Image (cartoon, grey):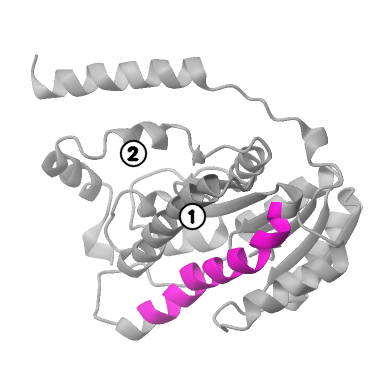
Amino acid sequence: MIPSGKALCAAGIIVGLLAFFWRDTFNPDSISGARVLLTGASTGIGEQMAYHYSRFGAEIVLTARRGTLLQKVMEKCLQLGAKKVFYIQADMSSPQAPEEVVHFALQKLGGLDHLVLNHIGGTPFRMWDGDVEHTRWLMQVNFLSYVALASAALPILAESKGSLIVVSSLTGKISTPFTTSYSATKFALDGFFSSLRHELAMQKQDVCITLCILGLIDTEMALEKTRDKVYMSAYPVAEAALTIIKGGATRAREVFYPWWLELLCCLRDWFPDQRDVVIQSFYNYTSV
């Protein structure tokens, strides 16, 4: 069998296994009354997650950099049915912000059942230009603040047997062009939280870690950055947000959206040279 035939055969087997084992076991009632701390909640995926959690009757603390937008999101959450909603303005480039945010959430909610780490720092979608300082800053926002938030919340999540939901990206599983610093932060998330999952299991702490691997989502920021630069479709932000919530509620190990990213990750180490050529073909180098 030629290599392409082997790859297609393997892909067919994996798709069949995924279809057989995957079941939607999500129960919306499991979210009712759940205490949720959600970062990056003012726009995009985080905003849509806030609305979904509200429809399910959760108690929520929202955080992001822009207080005016958070106020508007909070008001809509109350209209949609959230039992409680609070917000705290915070900039995750500050090393002090994570602990302050977790302390605020504990004061307002009395505990935590779900910590959803979703915020990201802005980064150019372009060729690497040697800006090491920007990479350091982005590591603080996209990675180190996640570690600090999780560390501050872990004792509380252990008490509630809660869930730690980490929103990541395909670029944290498979390297792609124009995302050098961003991709580094997302690979770091996978490494840290996958290792932490082992340690929690070894200590018999019943805290679930769900890593969410997302493709291109049709948020305003993502569409603006990738316009005329990538040849691929963006997927609905509201559906991505719901998929993340379902994964956390069902205590999934990893969540992929769209679903076929899981297949892509399974095959990522097969025929690496051909894989890279295919990946590069989806990017418009001349417009960067």
Q: Residues within 10 Å of mark 2 (few under 14, many from 20)?
A: some
CA–CA distance in space, label 1 to label 2: 21 Å
Magenta range is 135-158
Can you tell which mark lies on residue 2? Answer: none
Q: Is residue 26 above or below residue 58?
A: above
Mark sitting earlier along the chain (1/2): 1
Q: Are marks 1 and 2 in contact (CB under 8 Å)?
A: no
The label shown at residue 265 is 2
Judged from this view, the residue extending furthest toward the front is: 203
Residue 240 in the figure: left or right of residue 58: left
Does residue 16 sit above or below 283 in this rendering? above
In x, y percent, where is residue 39? 65, 64
Q: Quadrant of residue 263?
A: top left
Q: Amino acid at mark 2?
A: Cys
Q: What residue would you read off at disc 1?
A: 196
Q: Quadrant of the C terminus?
A: bottom left
What's the amino acid at mark 1?
Leu
> Measuring 14% from the left and 23% from the top, which residue is drawn there?
4
